[in-house]
Amino acid sequence: PLAADPQNPLAYGRPADGVYREEQEAEFDMLERLDQLALAKYPDDPKALARIKSYELAFRLQRAIPEVFEFQQETAFTQKLYGLDNATTAPFAKHCLAARRLVERGVRFVQIYYGGNGNAGGWDAHSALLQNHSSNCAAVDQPIGALLHDLKQRGMLDETLVVWGTEFG
């Protein structure tokens, strides 16, 4: 798996470096025209239909995702609420705020992960428990609280299931 990169939280959510949005749109327009020709010849081909839908979904995601991570669009209050102004909380705060923004846009399943695999220490500590758990809690408590508060004040908590689990669920 890819290591977490706080500068690029969704590695495949953007076009490749050096590819302009207009260029990518032109490529997908051409691909759509070619797909329509194939569908005219083979209108009931389920593999072709599935392939076309997957290309369309990938392109829609690449167009929508960058805006989700433009946190400067949030009010100063919201940025502070999540802890974007604090070096300890900012990395996880970005994940929580992105989760809220994704849910707002209709994404039905969002998973946020913290600990191990490139993030700060994991929760599965067998020594130095006070130090380990204190630093993990310092990084996640404020952003998680902000996410719950934010979802509730926007009326989204009524329809959003939030599950908080550790390595043992």
Image (tube, rainbow, N blue to C red):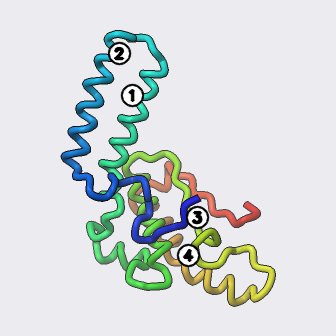
Q: Earlier in the sequence, mark 3 or mark 1?
A: 1
Label 4, label 1: how far apart the Cα atoms are: 40 Å
Residue holding disc 3: 113
Label 2, label 3: how far apart the Cα atoms are: 41 Å
Marks 2 & 3, CB-CB < 8 Å contact? no
Q: Earlier in the sequence, mark 2 or mark 3?
A: 2
Label 1, label 2: how far apart the Cα atoms are: 10 Å
In the image: residue 63, left or right of residue 166: left
Pick the residue in front: 169 or 39. Answer: 39
Q: Which mark identifies residue 39?
A: 2
4 vs 2, front mark: 2
Location of residue 152 in the rendering, given as x and y in whole percent from the top left corner: 46, 61
Location of residue 3 in the rendering, given as x and y in whole percent from the top left corner: 55, 66
Q: Is residue 56 visible?
A: yes
Q: Earlier in the sequence, mark 3 or mark 4?
A: 3
Marks 1 & 2, CB-CB < 8 Å contact? yes
Hey, what amino acid is under mark 2? Leu
3 vs 1, front mark: 1
Q: Earlier in the sequence, mark 1 or mark 2?
A: 2
Q: Within the image, what quadrant is residue 57 found in?
A: top left
Q: Dot 3: within a 10 Å radius of its alpha carbon, few (fewer than 14), some, or many (20 or more) residues?
A: some
Residue found at x 35% / y 75%: 79
Residue found at x 34% / y 54%: 16
2 vs 3, front mark: 2
Hey, what amino acid is under mark 1? Ile
Q: Which mark identifies residue 140?
A: 4
Residue sticking out furthest to the front: 18
In the image: residue 74, left or right of residue 163: left
Residue holding disc 1: 52
Q: Is residue 73 above or below residue 79?
A: above
Q: Dot 2: within a 10 Å radius of its alpha carbon, few (fewer than 14), some, or many (20 or more) residues?
A: some
Hey, what amino acid is under mark 4? Val
